[in-house]
Image: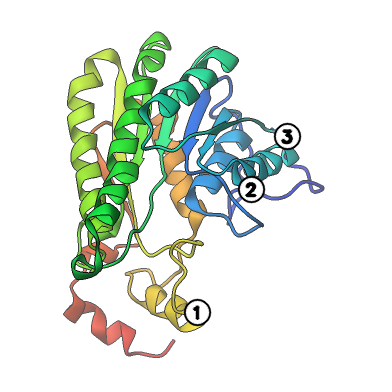
Amino acid sequence: MSADPDTPPVGGYTNGRGDRMRGRVALVTGAGSAGDYLGTGAATALLLAAQGATVGILDADPERAEHTRDRIEQVGGKAVVLTADLADEDAVRAAVDELAVRTGRLDAVVNNAGISGEGGIAATTRAGWDRVFAVNVTGAMLVARAAHPHLVRAGGGSIVNVSSVAALRGFGSGAYGASKGALQSLTTDLAYAWGGAGIRVNCLVPGHLYTPMGDHGGEAGREARRRANLLGTEGTAWDLAWAALFLAGPESRWITAAILPVDAGTTTATVLGMLPRMNTAG
């Protein structure tokens, strides 16, 4: 797909058009959007489509899913809108099957959808805890399980789960961090169980990205997040999308069970090590 100055740019800091996913079909959960401020799911769906994939946009909100499809079609891509509550097993299976029937195959799944919950453990209700796990972990498992026979028929494929640095470091996020840790364990178990069928399963661990879900504290919050990583730069949804594209595509054919941080080194440094940087202007 060649660049066209009259169509919206994709890919963030670089032009995302290409053919790395041409002929393939990818499913992205939580890929709905509203406006031009994209979350990781919408950015990933847009980038995969710009790279030639037909993309299934699975979201609980059909209007948000339609908005992402419109964005994809503006850059000449192809997309299918799918609606399901990820906690509903029958709805998930029906949505995944619909995509495979309409497109004839399924090659990649990006389990991006997630909800943050009610905060710390003391503030979390049992119903809130269960809902976070139902969407963030059980939902990912249901999507993967529904996709499994279609990936096998395609001769193998890729599942990319999206976790969070909250799974690796304490943030007081309660059910959210716990569920994202469980998603990492699910990743390695599925990689073990399905590797013989040629299905690769990997996990991305995004850091403090500037996205609708991660935008807290205004400009001061953005500056603090920038200073909290080793590169001193701000990450966006596109940084996660490029990593997802690599793991979903053929270039990563010999990578499975990997847990890949996309966090500018945030999780490799200690608080004491970062304080001098955070207290220095510039």
Figure check: 60 above or below 178: above
Task: Please tell me which residue is depicted at 35% across the width and 25% down the height of the picture.
Answer: 253
Disc sitting over residue 218 in the figure: 1
Do labels 2 and 1 touch, CB within 8 Å?
no
At x 82%, y 47%, the residue is 6
The residue that appears at 36% across and 37% down in the rendered structure is: 87
Looking at the rendered structure, the secondary structure element under dot 1 is helix
Tell which of 129 and 196 is nearer to you. Answer: 129
Q: Amino acid at mark 3?
A: Gly
Report whether residue 239 is seen: yes
Q: Is 233 left, or right, of 172 in this rendering?
A: right
Residue 205: x percent and y percent? 31, 51
Q: Earlier in the sequence, mark 3 or mark 1?
A: 3
- How far is the residue under mark 2 from the one under mark 1? 25 Å
Q: CA distance from mark 2 to mark 3?
A: 11 Å
In the image, 83 versus 228, the foreground residue is: 83
Can you identify the residue that label 2 sits on?
A: 10
Query: For the residue marked with disc 1, what is the amino acid?
Result: Gly
Q: Label 3, on which residue? A: 76
Colouring scheme, one of rainbow, by chain, secondary structure, one colour: rainbow
* Distance between mark 3 and mark 1 Cα atoms: 34 Å
Which one is closest to the eye, mark 3 or mark 1? 1
